[in-house]
Amino acid sequence: DQQVKQNSPSLSVQEGRISILNCDYTNSMFDYFLWYKKYPAEGPTFLISISSIKDKNEDGRFTVFLNKSAKHLSLHIVPSQPGDSAVYFCAATKGGKLIFGQGTELSVKP
Amino acid sequence: EPEVTQTPSHQVTQMGQEVILRCVPISNHLYFYWYRQILGQKVEFLVSFYNNEISEKSEIFDDQFSVERPDGSNFTLKIRSTKLEDSAMYFCASSPDSGKQETQYFGPGTRLLVL
């Protein structure tokens, strides 16, 4: 199931700089997109979401951008902190099951 | 802050045995889900449950799987006769009533190893 794709398996960023995580999707019927953060041996933790009728949602250091014409969303973390180091999953849904991307492992170096 | 809990954290079983994975969703949530993640692969949807019945299930969720909400708090996933390929992390999730239904909150997972 390749409806949601994260093409970068890993990303390394310096502390204090911006982290940009990308996600592409193929199904234009999705109406909600979410980002989750996951540490090893833990469940995914909800970070931020965006409805398909919006193009931006911001919550503290986290901003999600949605470009529907390109079927692309991104998560911006500013400023990045070492505690942000984790695997980040994007997910999409249409009123039910979440379809996840493969994840991007973010490493924030001090 | 309320959270989804799951027990056990780890389960080792022999092929062909039955296992029951348990979850306590967040108390005022009405939608319940099971997902799994095989090592190195994506998190995959298994089943969703609402109003005491399955609302959607994936092709993975065959006759060997069942879910139940035996009381007001627990939500269980049963695998009747485990196979080697059932080895995975199993995550339970729940979401509130309409309005924020799309936001699912996950438990810490149960690591199932089938030998």
Image: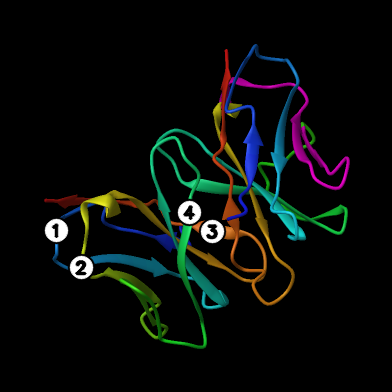
User: How far apart are the two marked residues, 3 and 2, measured between alpha carbons?
Assistant: 28 Å
The residues colored magenta run: B65-85
Is residue B17 positioned above or below A97 on the image?
above
- First reached walking from the N terminus: tag 1 or tag 4: 1
User: How far apart are the two marked residues, 1 and 4, measured between alpha carbons?
Assistant: 21 Å
* Mark 1 crowdedness (10 Å alpha carbons): few <14, some 14-19, many ≥20: some
* Mark 4 crowdedness (10 Å alpha carbons): few <14, some 14-19, many ≥20: some
Question: Do marks 1 and 4 both belong to one polypeptide chain?
Answer: yes
Question: Do marks 4 and 2 both belong to one polypeptide chain?
Answer: yes
The nearer-to-camera label among 3 and 2 is 2
- First reached walking from the N terminus: tag 1 or tag 2: 1
Question: Do marks 1 and 2 both belong to one polypeptide chain?
Answer: yes
Q: Give how far across and how far down residue A21 sits, in percent.
A: 28, 64
Per the image, the residue denoted by label 4 is A45
Q: Do labels 1 and 3 touch, CB within 8 Å?
A: no
Q: Give how far across and how far down residue A102 sits, in percent.
A: 39, 51
Per the image, the residue denoted by label 3 is A99
Per the image, the residue denoted by label 1 is A15
Asked if the stretch drawn in magenta spans residue B79, the answer is yes
Task: Report the amino acid beneath label 1.
Answer: Glu
Q: Give how far across and how far down residue B75 sits, in percent.
A: 77, 42
Tell me: A16 left or right of A21. left
The nearer-to-camera label among 1 and 3 is 1
Give me the residue at 57% from left, 77% from top.
Answer: A31
Query: Relative to the observer, which residue lies in front, B88 or B1?
Result: B1
User: How far apart are the two marked residues, 1 and 2, measured between alpha carbons?
Assistant: 7 Å
Q: Mark 1 lies on which chain?
A: A
Give me the residue at 30% from left, 71% from top.
Answer: A61
Per the image, the residue denoted by label 2 is A79
Is residue A106 visible in the rendered image? The answer is no
